[in-house]
Image (cartoon, grey):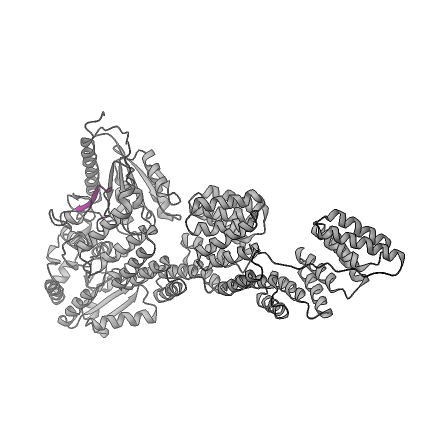
Amino acid sequence: MNREQRRTDKSGAQSGKSDASLAAQGLFDEALRHHQAGRLDDAVAQYRRALALKPDYAEVCNNLGVALQTQGRIGEAADQYRRTLELRPDSVQACINLGNICLAQGKFDEAAAHFERALVLRPDAAEAWNNLGNVLKKQGRLDDAIAHYERALALRPDYADAHINLGNAFQAQGKQGEAVRQYERTLVLNPGSADAHNNLGKALYEQGRLDDAVAHCERAIAINPGFVDAHNNLGNVLQAQRKEVEAVMHYERAIALNPGSADAHNNLGNMLKEQGRLDDARAHYERALALRPDNAETWNNLGSALQAQGKQGEAMAHYERALALRPDYADPWNNLGNALLAQGKQSEATAHYERALALRPGCAVTHNNLGNVLEEQGRLDEAMAHCEQAIALRPDYAGAHNNLGNVLKNQGRLDEAIRCYRKVLALNPDSAEGVYSNLLLAMVYAASVSPQELAATAREFGERLADPLRQQRPFVRDRDPERKLRIGYVSADFREHPANYFFEPLLKLHDRQTFEVFAYYNLAQGDNITARLKQEFDHWRDVHVLSDGAVANLIEADEIDILVDLAGHTGHSRLLVFARKPAPVQVTWLGYPATTGMVAMDYRITDSYAEPPGMTEHLNAETLWRLPEIFCCYAAHENSPDVIDHPPFEDNGHITFGCFNNFAKVTNPVLETWARILAQATESRLLLEILGLESPKFRAEVETRLQRCGLPLDRVILEPRKRSNQFVLYNRIDIALDPFPCAGGTTSFDTMWMGVPFITLAGEHFVSRMGVTILANAGMPELIAKNTDEYVSLAVNLALDKDRLRFLRHDLRQKVAASPLMNQPAFARNMEAAYREMWRKWCATQSDRKL
């Protein structure tokens, strides 16, 4: 913390005329000698003897006040200064000294009145200008404080205390460069000022000049080894340099010097929180609050630790306590936004981030957070603006580059998104897991990325982050290949999420005589689906607040035989748990359509339509396990509407093609192919559902892109993606068009369930062949194209052959329900047979050990 410098003056004595006056003068002179030598008790005694002889001796009263103040006897000192002013109302020094006491007591208005009185008496009193500046700074009136410090310096350019106080005010305004200049000026005037070195170190730390900051903090400590604030500030700088052991040493030294240092406890708590030692961090925050209950910063920090432990309600209460103390404190507004977002309350989170920015417009973190929640709401242009502002404020802000990549991906600007993610990996290699997942998902969608490049990047993730974490665990198991198995599923999607159209039927149909099923749920909030699924599992573990290592140890302690990843490289995955190999057999399924790139992942579930033998083995770090029919099985959403009883063209007088996939999958080659279809099916229309289309700017960008790809805007119908449109739009289209190279997944199942046939292009890896397995298993392989020319031909011919289109659409929902696409009992048996055979294979590899 910065120290404010105040001046307290001792005035000289004047000789009196009477013998009593002369005697009092002699006692006063003796008192001054004791005072100047630091013998305060002797000085106080002599000052009192002088006053006994001459009670109206104003100079003695003033200096007695100074000695008493130095001893910490503030009330007695104030009485002496007031007595001085009664005797000599024009005593500038008594006004200044009494003002200093009032300032120390927090009586800011009274302190200001005394300093102002001093300035009326002597307008050139630099000390009064300086100390009145201190009052104004305490009141938060920084501009006024700066003006007063500058007036003091105009009167006394060599006034070191005013320079350091002016630096403190600039630092409070975030003007670190100006603060540095004032502290450096102070050190020219007073090279031995430990306060100036310490405060300069803090300002340099704020500028990111960490080595220079260390040097000045260390100089402050060399001058004053017991300087608590300097140890505390040096700990902050060392923490920023990731020198954690040294940082702890200085925080602990600060606490040893002053166990009542709330700042040191708070800062040590911050470092422990970053290390994931949340209980220890909380203990130090609580100690800091016991020492200083009115510290809004510590309430905020304790809330952050509680939030990291998943205790959202307690965290929010602490943020609100911080705001009750300091309503203009931006950090708790930001953190409340984070807590609300974690609860899925996007609109409320947005409002809190906006309030934080109103208080602190230059906060890159809050701009980034607001960009993130706006992206989730589909407000992509606004999201982009805030991400770009965060980057303008902090060009090396990896999180903002990552979120900007997410926005660009959702806008279909995949190559730009990929560059953003690569930038993040260059800026911050240590926090790369989620960034790699974002990068890989964008690469899945991008037409510019080959299957080989996608696989190579996944392996880069594995080699760089995942594979080094693999542990050799004993796996003390009953190795009977036919015994009851313990299956663990890891996911953040046990809630209202498309993944549950495929997972919930399997969960409900698991044979509990032969399988015991565990959930490892990786999200703070849940919903009615979460509550429903919770009843279906044999065991439920909330793991979102646990570290990867702790989750892995929990899984090992649960003696899971087969651990199944349901996320892959998608949001809220826990791939680095799997990297630690906590289960003998590990499988990835459903959530992500490509390899994880990890040697610890044993199998990836697929089928022979999506990946014929020999086609894609070289693209996978895992062994491919092909199910007999299809790699997944669909259960329709309970709120899906009925299919209309006739094709829409009968009402419209023209064919309507449609695509409701994530627009990121709709690459330029796709749009160009669709333009060829519309050119040949001359009366047809194209209906697209796109997230973020409510933005006029984004809509204009989409329309420009469509035109560049040859699509006539008067024949394209654009609909914004919103909840109320789910399933409803299918009854407005006759034929669906599958994007490529990343084909539709859940959307294609929805399409068929809603009675709409679709055209797909068969690629050469799983990502581009999901439509192949769906149509093949539905008994409609004739809608699978081998190249773009055939894709166009199939779509145009079906549009022109109305009778065939009616035939394909007739009872399509019933046909799908009777096919392997929705034969849930058969699929459950196929998955369980796969698990059993995987277990048998593992047991066979353990044959040299005792069963």
Number of numbered labels in the structure image: 0
Q: Nearer the viewer, residue 415 or 52?
A: 52
- For this orientation, the residue located farthest to the top is 850
Answer whether residue 687 is magenta in the image. no
Q: Quadrant of the N terminus?
A: bottom right
Q: Nearer the viewer, residue 725 or 126?
A: 126
Q: Nearer the viewer, residue 819 or 459?
A: 459
From this view, report whether residue 769 is shown above or below residue 539: below
Instruction: Give coordinates of residue 353: x percent, y percent.
Output: 45, 60
Is residue 368 toward the left or the right of residue 647 in the image? right
Instruction: Give coordinates of residue 389: x percent, y percent.
Output: 39, 65
Identify the magenta region.
592-606
Is residue 597 toward the left or the right of residue 694 in the image? left
* Residue at image point 25% right, 31% down: 484
Is residue 411 toward the left or the right of residue 11 in the image? left
Instruction: Give coordinates of residue 360: x percent, y percent.
Output: 48, 63
From this view, report whether residue 628 is shown above or below residue 124: above
Q: Nearer the viewer, residue 211 or 68?
A: 211
Q: Quadrant of the C terminus?
A: top left
Answer whether residue 601 is magenta in the image. yes
Can residue 300 be seen in the rendering of this structure? no
* Residue at image point 19% right, 42% down: 826
Instruction: Give coordinates of residue 804: x percent, y percent.
Output: 11, 62
Residue 517's image quarter? Answer: top left
Can residue 183 be seen in the rendering of this structure? yes
- For this orientation, the residue located farthest to the right is 18
User: Magenta region, mostly helix, strand or loop?
Assistant: loop
